[in-house]
Image (cartoon, rainbow, N blue to C red):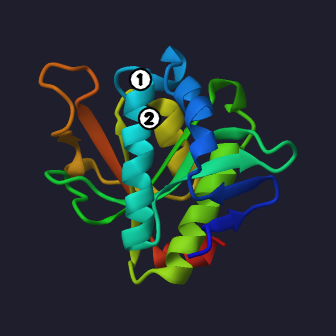
Amino acid sequence: MAEFRLETARLVLRGWRESDRVAFHAINTDPRVMRFLGPLMSLEDIDALIGRLTRMQDELGHCFWAVERKEDGRLIGWCGLIRGAKGTPIEDQLEVGWRLAFDQWGQGYAHEAASAAITWAFDHLADERVWAITVDDNDRSWGLMERLGMARHEALGFDHPNVPQGSPLRAHITYSISKADWAAAH
């Protein structure tokens, strides 16, 4: 099967490659990037994660894809679509997510990639809504959700079951946008 590839003006969202592991490991060992995402990841953690994402892409046709800059081919993070985790208000629902290298923040790349992923979702999948979650304190992430036109669901705040009890990262908030609202805005 051909590698997944979705292009924007400045980015390529694509399937994962063996050559991505070291660059993605560097992103996931930066405490600034991981502040709201959990512990720093070992290279073994990255290998396992890329393996899960590759299997997800093969099975579902989507995952959190590798994101590279067109100008130089640099892997700058991930963005894409997964199914919400078990035990969350968005279990099995379509979830958009992103994670970029710290030096790439503030340049509009996350918005560009997430917009492309949401558009792709509504063009290729039967879902009528795309969801997103984040830690309540992660104002950069929920700020992007709002800039994407997503609305917060106050009643769907939750403690993430995959985050240890007592962790300040356990409390999450939930956003979504409907296919109709996305189409009206784009």
The residue closer to the viewer here, 159 or 183, is: 159
Point out the image quarter for the C terminus.
bottom right
Q: Amino acid at mark 1?
A: Ser
Q: Which mark is residue 46?
A: 2
Q: Is residue 31 left or right of residue 74?
A: left
On the image, numbered disc 1 is attached to which residue?
A: 42
Question: In the rendered structure, are the residues bearing label 1 and label 2 in contact, judged by CB atoms less than 8 Å apart?
Answer: yes
Quarter holding residue 177: bottom left
**Dot 2 alpha-carbon crowd within 10 angstroms: few under 14, some 14 to 19, many 20 or more:** some
Quarter holding residue 14: bottom right
* Residue 23 seen: yes
* Residue 77 seen: no
- In the image, residue 39 above or below residue 98: above
Q: Secondary structure at mark 2?
A: helix
Q: Amino acid at mark 2?
A: Ile
Quarter holding residue 91: bottom left
Q: Is residue 26 left or right of residue 166?
A: right
Q: Is residue 80 left or right of residue 128?
A: right
Residue 45 screen position, x and y as percent: 37, 31
Residue at 67 percent across and 66 percent down: it is 6
Query: How many discs mark residues in the rendered view?
Result: 2
Q: Secondary structure at mark 1?
A: loop
Residue 29 screen position, x and y as percent: 50, 20
**Dot 1 alpha-carbon crowd within 10 angstroms: few under 14, some 14 to 19, many 20 or more:** few
Q: Residue furthest right?
A: 71
Residue 104 screen position, x and y as percent: 70, 32
Residue at 45 percent across and 65 percent down: it is 57
